[in-house]
């Protein structure tokens, strides 16, 4: 094997080994009902996927990239394999990042920086979730790579437009990134405005994004009373999110690796081997994302920092070069640098107690926990009140094992034989017999035992199981409920019971 290929080969081998241990297949009876890493938004993503597969559900019309992938898997009866697809797109991000870093750094530095990204405990944990970030990020990195390569191969502008368009179909975070690239173009590549290839790429991006926006506008106009993915309502000036995103970014990269990021940032602009185009392709999208999340999009969520992580990794690579330069000054420096790098890699793997925004690892078992409250609109707000040093409930041995192997904690099995699962099929058959396709079933605000506590998630979960809309009880002819929660005026032993199976009951409302 040629020497220059060795870092890439080692990175690939480590990634495959990590993939086997970190993302071992989670065998579930039903992805919607049994997958253990579903959040509130995940059920809505599944609903959107079922809509594109032809089910009679009411979608909110989230960006179509992920739902279309889910629709294809559902048609094949393979939706539980979505976590494998998540991992494949995470791998694509690493490959794209390695190629971007190789424009500036040698293979060893690029591979080491990519290891930090791929092996991050939070990145690995998040890659199991059903969200768009894992799928959108690789296209944004590829767009940056195409921007850089367009300086010597103008046809790369077409790839730039296609990649940015693909990223837009997965996440609207592509919009602030677009503004970042526009600034980078004006600063470092203004002469490309005269190239036909640039305008061809811009046209491709416009067609992709414009076609989706036109369809979305048409659908909302035709379905005025349906659900909405109302991201536009959150676009407003706000300064309250800046501390939360700085805290989230610090938790994401880790306190020890943060030293490398800072050292790299301090030397980034003065690095002699970095071209102005490469620097612009990193800095301006990163600045645009930072300004957008901190001051324009009025929501706080740790996962949004993932869009910035690949661009921050370019600072990390420069920091690793600084560390290597120091290591070459003597034996003591080499030993100290190796020890620090090992500690940084380990710190990068620390598993957090939860997905929560409020934690920052101080050690493998100790976390600084800020105060966390929620506004009436469910926006997370960090504050100093109630801040404390929290200790993980897991033992040190368990945490160290998870940090090294990445194997997730075990979960209670979800079996087809369980009545909580099998009885939904019975309910669905009765609902399909009595109601036409597209007619809703009602759901009590007191959700069945073991279901998501928030009503919105439970309606989406039930809609995905019954393949039909779910509404408030008064808007439906049939009502689904848990047997332990009879609504006022209902007696589940009387004649209006359609079917009673295990923990569920389906009754007539009129």
Image: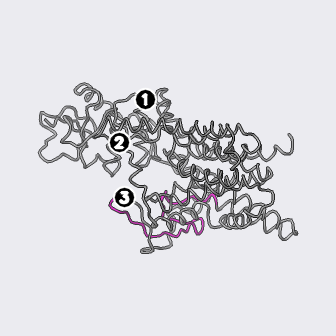
**Residue 53 circle label:** 1
- Tell me what residue is drawn at x 54 percent, y 39 percent: 206
- Tell me what residue is drawn at x 47 percent, y 41 percent: 63
Residue marked by disc 3: 378
User: In the image, is residue 456 above or below residue 478?
Assistant: below
- Rate crowding at label 2 as few (under 14), some (14 to 19) or many (20 or more) other CA atoms within 10 Å: many
- Rate crowding at label 1 as few (under 14), some (14 to 19) or many (20 or more) other CA atoms within 10 Å: some
Q: Is residue 219 magenta?
A: no
Question: Which of the 4 image quarters holds residue 477?
Answer: top left
Residue marked by disc 2: 460
The residue nearer to you, when weighing 64 against 53, is: 64
Q: Quadrant of the N terminus?
A: top right
The residue nearer to you, when weighing 155 against 433, is: 155
Magenta highlight range:
348-377
**Most distant residue in the top direction:** 433
Q: Is residue 196 visible?
A: yes
Q: Quadrant of the C terminus?
A: top left
Provide residue 165's location: percent of width, then percent of height: 56, 40
- Tell me what residue is drawn at x 26 percent, y 41 percent: 471
Question: Which of the 4 image quarters holds residue 87?
Answer: top right
Question: Is residue 4 shown left or right of residue 198?
Answer: right
């Amino acid at each position: 094997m040629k020497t220059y290929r060795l870092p890439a080969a080692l990175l690939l081998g480590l990634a495959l080994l990590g993939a086997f241990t970190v993302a071992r297949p989670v065998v579930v009876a039903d992805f919607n009902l049994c997958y253990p890493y579903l959040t509130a938004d995940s059920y809505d993503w599944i609903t959107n996927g079922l809509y594109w597969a032809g089910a009679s559900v009411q979608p909110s019309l989230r960006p179509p990239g992920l739902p279309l992938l889910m629709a294809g898997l559902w048609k094949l009866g393979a939706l539980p394999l979505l976590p494998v697809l998540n991992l494949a797109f995470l791998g694509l991000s690493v490959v794209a990042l390695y190629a971007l870093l190789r424009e500036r750094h040698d293979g060893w530095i690029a591979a080491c920086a990519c290891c930090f990204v791929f092996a991050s405990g939070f990145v690995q944990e998040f890659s199991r979730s059903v969200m768009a970030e894992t799928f959108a990020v690789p296209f944004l990195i590829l767009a940056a790579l195409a921007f850089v390569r367009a300086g010597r191969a103008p046809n790369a502008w077409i790839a730039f437009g296609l990649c940015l368009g693909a990223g837009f179909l997965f996440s609207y975070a592509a919009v602030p990134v677009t503004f970042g690239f526009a600034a980078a173009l004006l600063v470092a590549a203004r002469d490309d405005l005269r190239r036909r290839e640039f305008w061809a790429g811009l046209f491709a991006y416009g067609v992709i994004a414009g076609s989706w926006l036109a369809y979305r506008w048409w659908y909302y106009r035709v379905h005025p009373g349906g659900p909405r993915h109302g991201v536009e309502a959150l676009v407003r000036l706000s300064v309250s999110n800046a501390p939360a995103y700085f805290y989230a970014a610090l938790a994401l990269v880790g306190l020890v690796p943060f030293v490398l990021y800072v050292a790299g940032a301090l030397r980034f602009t003065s690095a002699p081997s970095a071209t102005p185009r490469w620097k612009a392709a990193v800095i301006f999208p990163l600045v645009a994302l930072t300004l957008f999340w901190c001051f324009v999009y009025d929501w706080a969520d740790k996962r949004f920092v993932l869009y910035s992580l690949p661009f921050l990794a370019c600072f990390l690579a420069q920091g690793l070069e600084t560390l290597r330069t120091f290591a070459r000054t003597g034996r003591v420096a080499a030993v100290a640098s190796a020890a620090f790098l090992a500690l940084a890699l380990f710190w990068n793997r620390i598993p957090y107690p939860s997905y929560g925004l409020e934690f920052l690892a101080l050690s493998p078992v100790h976390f600084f926990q800020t105060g966390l409250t929620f506004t009436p609109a469910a926006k997370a707000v960090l504050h100093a009140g109630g801040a404390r040093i929290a200790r993980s409930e897991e033992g040190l041995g368990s945490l160290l094992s998870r940090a090294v192997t990445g194997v997730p904690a075990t979960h209670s099995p979800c079996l087809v034989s369980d009545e909580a699962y099998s009885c939904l099929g019975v309910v669905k058959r009765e609902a399909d017999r009595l109601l036409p396709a597209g007619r809703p079933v009602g759901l009590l605000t007191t959700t069945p035992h073991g279901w998501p506590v928030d009503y919105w998630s439970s309606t989406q979960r039930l809609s995905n199981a019954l393949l039909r809309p779910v509404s408030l009880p008064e808007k439906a002819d049939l009502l689904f409920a848990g047997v332990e929660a009879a609504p006022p005026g209902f007696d589940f032993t009387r004649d209006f019971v359609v079917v009673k199976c295990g923990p569920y009951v389906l009754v007539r409302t009129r």
